[in-house]
Structure formats: C-alpha cells, structure tokens
Image (spheres, rainbow, N blue to C red):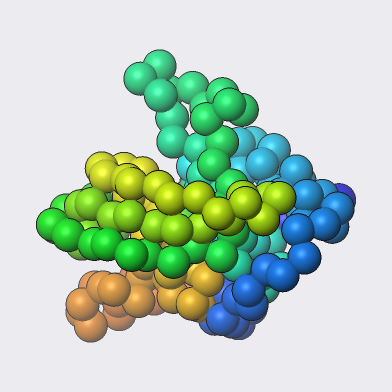
C-alpha cells in the first residue's frame, strides 16, 4: 500500500476520525504501511488521518537512549480513550503534517489510556514524559486538532505567514 503524508492546510486533517470496528486485513495492511513511512520521515508518531484514512488508529515509536526506534518498541493504538490526566509539561512539538515547524505546547504530564490493539484486544497504558506528549498529540489528530491550533493568536498569525512563505519556496524549488 502506497501512502503519502497529508500536509497542512489540507482539509482532510480537520476530519473527525471514525471508530475502528473491523480488526481485519485492511487495518493490518494500513498499519504495516504507516510504520515504514513514519520511520523513513523521522517521525515518532503518526495518525491514520495523516495518511488520508479517517479512522481512530495511530502509531508511535519513541526513540530509545541511542536514538533508535526498533520495531519491538512500536505501539499501535486503536480507539484510544483517556481515563486519567494530571500534571503539566511543555515540549517543543513538531508534526509530519506541518513540516519544518516546532512550537512549545502545553500538555498533561501523566495520562492513562484504554485502547485496542490491531486484533481488537483491550489494553491499558500508563504514560508520562515524551510518550504521554506524543499520545496526546496523536489523539488530537483523531479529533481534527493540530498542535498549531493551541498557539496564541499572535504566534498563530506568525506561523501562517511563515508557513505560506515556506510553501511558496518549496513549490518554486520543484
Ligand atoms: C512530541 C511531540 C510531537 C509528537 C508527534 C509526532 N511528531 C513527529 O513525529 C514529527 C516528526 C517530524 C519529522 C521531521 O523530519 C522530516 O520530515 C524528515 C520534521 O522535519 C521537517 O519537517 C523538516 C518535522 C517533524 C511526538 C512527540
Ligand atoms: Co501530528
């Protein structure tokens, strides 16, 4: 399956993703194709909507101390629901759908989620630090929310101006 990253301001990123009901081959094929795309583009998290599939599925692979992302560290999270959130942390976030931009975003420091794996088995995950931040960023994608939506009015205006300029430059260099 050939996948490409949907980039802001594509309207598909604003869609609310639908619950996954069938844990079948087509879901597995999608997840299997998302992983190499995420790794090859230096990503640590990717939601299905970012590759044009509006379903509540996301993958994560947080780099280890050596900066490696071995396949055994891959997390596949389907139909996540947050059951606990506490604390506060700020991290400079980036997104494969908003290339070349990084902004400080406030998130919960500790979370607990219930989710399903690719076979439909129910799981619970307690996360903190970078994993908790990444899960919240990816769960926002399922609601059509991007990290840039959390910027102040002034920062967002600055972002829009710079992003448009960057897009023009990219178009001209093609
Ligand atoms: C902390 C904060 C945010 C997340 C969400 C997942 N975000 C990413 O995986 C971002 C990846 C990313 C990769 C880039 O590199 C390439 O595209 C080659 C990148 O650089 C450029 O756009 C030039 C930007 C973002 C998880 C944890
Ligand atoms: Co993102």
Residue 154 placement (x, y as % from top left): 21, 79
Residue at horizontal 68%, vertical 50%? 118
Residue name at image x 43 percent, y 50 percent: 124
Name the spot of residue 27 as percent of width and height, x first.
77, 57
In the current view of this chain or complex, which residue is farthest to the left? 87
Is 133 left, or right, of 106 in this rendering? right
Q: Is residue 58 visible?
A: no
Residue at 77% across / 65% down in the picture? 22
- Residue 37 is left or right of residue 75, and the answer is right
Q: In which quarter of the image is residue 13?
A: bottom right
Q: Can residue 30 be seen in this view?
A: yes
101 is higher (above) or lower (below) than 49 = above
Residue 167 as seen in the image, left or right of residue 161: right
Query: Hey, which quadrant is residue 168 in on the image?
Result: bottom right
Residue 33: x and y in percent read 76, 46
- Counting labels gives 0
Q: Residue at x 68, y 68 (%)?
A: 20
Q: In this view, does 52 lie above or below 128?
A: below
Name the quarter where the C terminus is drawn.
Answer: bottom right
Q: Which of 118 and 96 is in front in this view?
A: 118
Splitting the image into 4 quarters, where does residue 15 fall? bottom right
Residue lying furthest top: 66
């Amino acid at each position: 399956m050939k996948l490409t990253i949907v980039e802001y301001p594509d309207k598909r990123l604003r869609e609310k993703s639908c619950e996954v009901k069938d844990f079948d081959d087509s879901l597995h094929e999608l997840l299997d194709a998302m992983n190499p795309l995420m790794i090859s583009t230096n990503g640590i998290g990717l939601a299905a909507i970012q590759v044009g599939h509006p379903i509540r599925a996301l993958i994560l692979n947080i780099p280890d101390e050596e900066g490696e992302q071995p396949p055994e560290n891959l997390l596949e999270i389907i139909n996540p629901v947050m059951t606990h959130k506490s604390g506060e942390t700020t991290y400079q976030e980036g997104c494969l759908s908003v290339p070349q931009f990084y902004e400080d975003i406030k998130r919960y420091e500790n979370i607990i989620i219930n989710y399903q794996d690719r076979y439909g088995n129910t799981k619970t995950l307690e996360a903190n630090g970078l994993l908790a931040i990444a899960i919240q960023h990816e769960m926002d994608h399922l609601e059509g929310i991007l990290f840039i939506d959390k910027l102040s009015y002034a920062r967002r205006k600055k972002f829009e101006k710079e992003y448009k300029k960057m897009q023009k430059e990219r178009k001209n260099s093609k």
